[in-house]
Image: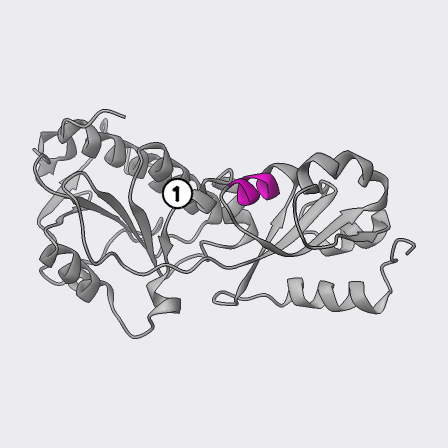
Amino acid sequence: MPPLGPRSAEVSRLRRQIRDRKRGDDFIVVEGMRLVSEALNAGMVPTRVVIGEKSRSDLVDVLGHIEVRPLVVVDDAFKSLCSTVSPQPLLSLFTRPKYETPTTLETDDLLLVSVGVADPGNLGTMIRAAAAVRASGVLTFGGVDPWAQKTLRSSAGTAFKMEIVDPGIDDPGTDIATRLAELRQLGARVVATAANAETVYSDLDLSGAPVAIVVGSESQGLHRDSLGDQVDDWVRIPMAPGVESLNVAMATTLMLYEARRAAGQRL
């Protein structure tokens, strides 16, 4: 079968499917050899694979063991399916992973709770940091889609190795205060960031219990009212005079590594 062009019915249907994807859909779109390889290595099974005609022979090692027959398209058709300016010649659709909020926690468990983070680059970097410290999972309330293509690229494929819970999609109607209360009932110590908190983040003793780190949006941080009384410790990251705040991804990375250090846990 010859490669399909950009106006073929099959490519047109696929282009609409990718273009119209929204948060909560049952599929995710993964572009590029590295990210597709990371997804495959994590045990994910593709439902659709598309390759550019000129790169068919170069992708044998990556695609040799999958059961889905690749759709081969001309280069112009491939570019029309992609979100990047200079796309790599491989695109795949996977079933969106779905996880639930943990129902049990171990002493060394570490969770990241993201509230309203709006930039996919930030959220992807935060997921990557969570994976780097062997966090047990990530919960995302509002903000950007954790499975959007830009988020996945920023996570460098680590999103496929993490249990990412999107409660607003997979369990609608459950607010963050309720979720934090459930984590506390499981023994978690909830630590949240605030610029005006009295306690410095590195002064906490976080040993002996699982920890949930809660961070807020880039523009507004966390609204204390929305968290109810479900925060055990409000902490701040000290900064030099004249510096108002850190980038949320940078602050999250500091908090995650400090949580491991303060608990006496080595990576």
Q: Is residue 175 visible?
A: yes
Residue 233: x and y, percent? Answer: 10, 45
Q: Magenta segment range?
A: 35-41
The residue at the point 13 percent across, 63 percent down is 228
Above or below — where is 262 with respect to 249?
above
Whether residue 23 sits left or right of residue 9 in the image: it is: left
Q: Is residue 189 left or right of residue 179?
A: left
Which corner quadrant holds the C terminus?
top left
Residue 120 image position (x, y, % from top left): 47, 49
Which of the 4 quarters of the picture holds residue 10?
A: bottom right
Is residue 246 placed above or below 216 in the rendered structure? Answer: above
* Total numbered badges shown on the rendered structure: 1
Disc 1 marks which residue? 127
Magenta region's main secondary structure? helix
Comparing 38 with 130, the one in front is 38
Q: Identify which amino acid the numbered label 1 is placed on.
A: Ile
> Which residue sits at x=87%, y=64%?
7
Compared to 137, does 47 lie above or below?
A: below
Crowding at dot 1, Cα within 10 Å, few <14 / some 14-19 / many 20+, comes out as many
Residue 47 screen position, x and y as percent: 63, 59
Q: What's the residue at 30%, 53% (across, down)?
A: 220
| Residue 193 visible from this viewpoint | no
Left-right relation of 195 to 140? left
